Image (cartoon, helix red, strand yellow):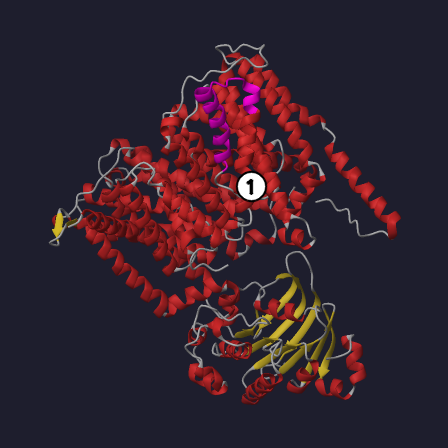
Amino acid sequence: MAGNDISSGPGNAGRAQARHEAAEFLLRRHRFRPAEALPWLIAIAAFFVFPDRMTFGSQVLVMILFAISLDLILGYAGIVTLGHAAFFGVGAYTVGLASARLGWTEPISGLFAAAIMAALAGFISGWFLLRYRGLTLLMLTLATAIMILETGNFRSDITGGYDGMPGLVFQPVLGMFEYDLYGRTNYLYALAVLAVVFFFVRRIVYSPFGQALTGIRENVRRMHAIGSPVHRRLVTVYTIAAAIAGVAGALFTQTNAYVTLTVFDFDTSAKVLVMLILGGTGRLYGAFIGAAVYLILEDHLSKLSPTFWQFGIGILLLVTVLFARRGILGVIEDLGRFRSWKGRIRMVPGRIVWSNVQWKGIGMAAFDGALIGLAVGFAANVGRTNLLWSWFVTEPLSVLAWTAAGAALVAAINIGYLVYAERSATGSTPR
Amino acid sequence: MVERALELDMVRAGYGETVVLEDVALAVAPDEIVSIIGRNGVGKSTLLATIMGHTNLHGGRVLLHGRDISHVATYRRVVDGLGYVPQEREIFPSLTLRENLEVAARPGPWTVETVFELFPRLSERAANRGNQLSGGEQQMLAIGRALIGNPTVLLMDEPSEGLAPVIVEELTRAVKRLTKAGGLAIVLVEQNSRLALDIAPRAVVMDRGRIVYDGPSATLRDDPVKLEQLIGVVKS
Amino acid sequence: MPQVATIAVSILFDGLAYAMFLFITAVGLSVTMGLMNFVNLAHGAFAMAGGYFVVSLTQSYGVDFISSLIIASVLVGLISIRFERRLYRPLYKAGELDQVLLTIGLAFMAIAAFTFFYGPIPKSVPLPQWLQGNVDLGFRAFPRYRAFLIVLGLFLVAVLWYGFERTNIGARIRAAVDNRRMAESVGINVDLLFTVTFAIGSGLAALGGGLAIQLFGLTPYFAVLYLVLFLIVVAVGGLGSLKGTLMAALLLGIVDTAGKYLIAEAGGFFIYVITVIVLLLKPAGFYGRQ
């Protein structure tokens, strides 16, 4: 991260100079770059180009907001949590219960109420939980989320349980904008909320506080050693992120006019995690790309076959973690650097590939590919046969073809990856 | 050509991207005892860690009995004849003393019984768990655990550190018995240079990741000024 | 028999059976997580696979229940070796986030695959005659199947305990859990050790999955439904500890059963409360290492 060493430079003059340079650096990062206008332009364009998909569009915006809140704690502070849906749910139910049970239907104050309730939940749980790391933290966040879920389930008389509370009513935004059947008002409303919150988050991230968070993520021990109030900072960011997740949840309820307990599910936490990783963590716009791509894919593929879609997410995760760890945004950045590599690409990656070890690895990979090809071939043929082995016996050539195709494909992928990895090693450093 | 039990050939190594050892060249004969001395932080422990394969080798080679083990997994190096007594002793806390020895046992003259002969105190505490032993007992166990693997090259990292002088004497006696027995090359890293020069006939002095002296211990014993110069601080 | 005692006995019995299921399935996860520091959220998928293999073996191939359990466990154990080598090994040094993501991805793929092959309808297994019905102990009749589960569980506890505490391999595993680098430095091939341990753990999970069919029914969502439970048992018991897993399984199994008996709607709540309390007080679990 920032390489400004404040300890260098003799005496007060040196320190003032160094401090000035650090501030300048932050200010430069803070300034808006032209590329940043792109996602917003796309969002506005979508309003005109897809007027009949606005309800879907609102969901995308809600998820983007939710993913941003997760990015704050995961991408910037490095806190791994499986229970972030808890705050989303708290926000969603604050607004839902207020509308259904208390008759409070003003939307903007609903957002604030949701933010406050979620922030409270975040503060309390964060204060206790953030002393831990690793598996312990994972389990604690998960258990906390489930406890809130079970509480909601327990008093399903109030919360409506898993059936939820349908038919919620909200007043027009600012008393002026009526809701229409196509959800257009909702979309612009969500976009406005997203813009405001995003601006706020952006300021945090580029502030000294944000830098401290990155420090905590990268080397907790050192931050402790230099006397940084780690726990306090973590709780602060956790609370803020919880508040934002709460706002997202509130938006969810308001734009759907409906809320159920599934907002607290592990599924919800997992979904937003996947979206964020897909887009890329630690870079504010990763949430935009990840949520949009995920939801669009889901919309198209789960209509074809929900099972297929679920398998697809699984593969997507695998591929992302193994090959594109920094998400879509990371791949885009890599491609950007690719142009400067043209002169340095070695199509035959030198000594690494030709040693024994690598061939054995590729051989084993091909073996797995063969197994996979066999399994896929079997799946493709399973409708036609009754018993497990008849396909093997009656169509041995087909069996062979699938196996060979699988082996060849996996081997090719592996070799391709080796070449890519070799290029990455000789090229620039990550992010 | 003299057969070399252990050889480091222009080794550059460190942890992660850093480089701690710079162009280190060292050769140890099968029955030789070498001590490695120098101030704190010059890379003595890193040298042993590199031989064991715990560090990142940026350049050069490590050879064991003439075979290049630079990219061989740690456990295989041990199977091939390396024995390691780490600086923190690193006894397995949830195993008993006897189990600590048993998991490390390999075929050869050293067995649980012969280790107990070398360190009689250990046989009394055989059923105690690793985390119930005193510092001195842990050190003896660490040495015994390395020996029971029947190594041909034994690496010891600051065995005297943090121990009472009485225990250090006992350890010194044991190590001297080892050296007399033969069949074992020993590389001994020590902060206590006086002790090191006493035990080992050959001394290697390191400074800032490099070897600055490699010769008879007697020379350094007889010339304390030179020793001070090489090490760089007042010797302990 | 007085009402309270009857209820208490029922809770104990059912809770014990439940605890044995939890132990058998979760113990492999505990040891592999303790050994390799790897968060494996696909463990539930291995259990589920075991369950479905037992269903296929008993219903499509007419193999008897017990043999099916054995075959399914061995099969899943062997298959898991490929997964470990290819997919898990590259991520041992990665952070827990990457491991969580990879294994969740595998779990999703497993759910989808099994939905495709077996359909979403819950499956059951035909039990042999001697496992059906009740065994009458005079003051009460107990379902034979659960009694079998308890006996089997205790038997496995004994076998595992012996293997872990009294054999050389068990000592090596414990040494590697204590200090992996030092274990390698005394000549222990920790990679191989881990593969073997992982295979056994996955095989046990498959066994647990096969045993669970009669208790809970089997759907493709088994992989994630019970995953949280396994994770809780492991976290509360402490990674890499046989004793810890057993204690946690007993505690959570009995408390959960008691909760569901006594307060039907809120029953599931208590194990989470206990989890949070235990972890706040002892973050490494009962017998975990810090």
Q: Is residue A138 left or right of residue B168?
A: left
Any magenta on residue B29? no
Q: Is residue B16 visible?
A: yes
Name above or below for residue A367 compared with residue A315: below
Q: Which sits in the foreground, C102 or C209?
A: C209
Is residue A292 shown to the viewer in this render? no
Q: Is residue A88 magenta?
A: yes
Q: Kindly identify which residue carries mark 1.
A: A325
Q: Main secondary structure of the magenta part?
A: helix
Report x, y in % for residue C183: 49, 67
Task: Read off the magenta span.
Answer: A84-111
| Residue C244 pos. (x, y %) | 38, 58
Q: Total of numbered circles in the picture?
A: 1
Q: What residue do we see at 63% from left, 24% from top?
A: A195
Q: Position of residue A105 (x, y in %)?
A: 50, 17
Figure quadrant of residue A208 = top right
Residue drawn where x is 25% and y is 51% of the image: C12
Q: Chain of mark 1?
A: A
- Looking at the picture, does residue A195 appear above or below residue B105? above
Type of residue at label 1? Arg
Q: Secondary structure at mark 1?
A: loop
Callout 1: few (<14), some (14-19), or many (20+) C-alpha neighbours within 10 Å? Answer: many
Residue C135 picture location, percent across and down: 13, 51
Quarter assignment of residue A71: top right
- Looking at the image, residue B149 sits to the left or right of residue B15; the answer is left
Residue drawn at point x = 50 percent, y = 78 percent: B141
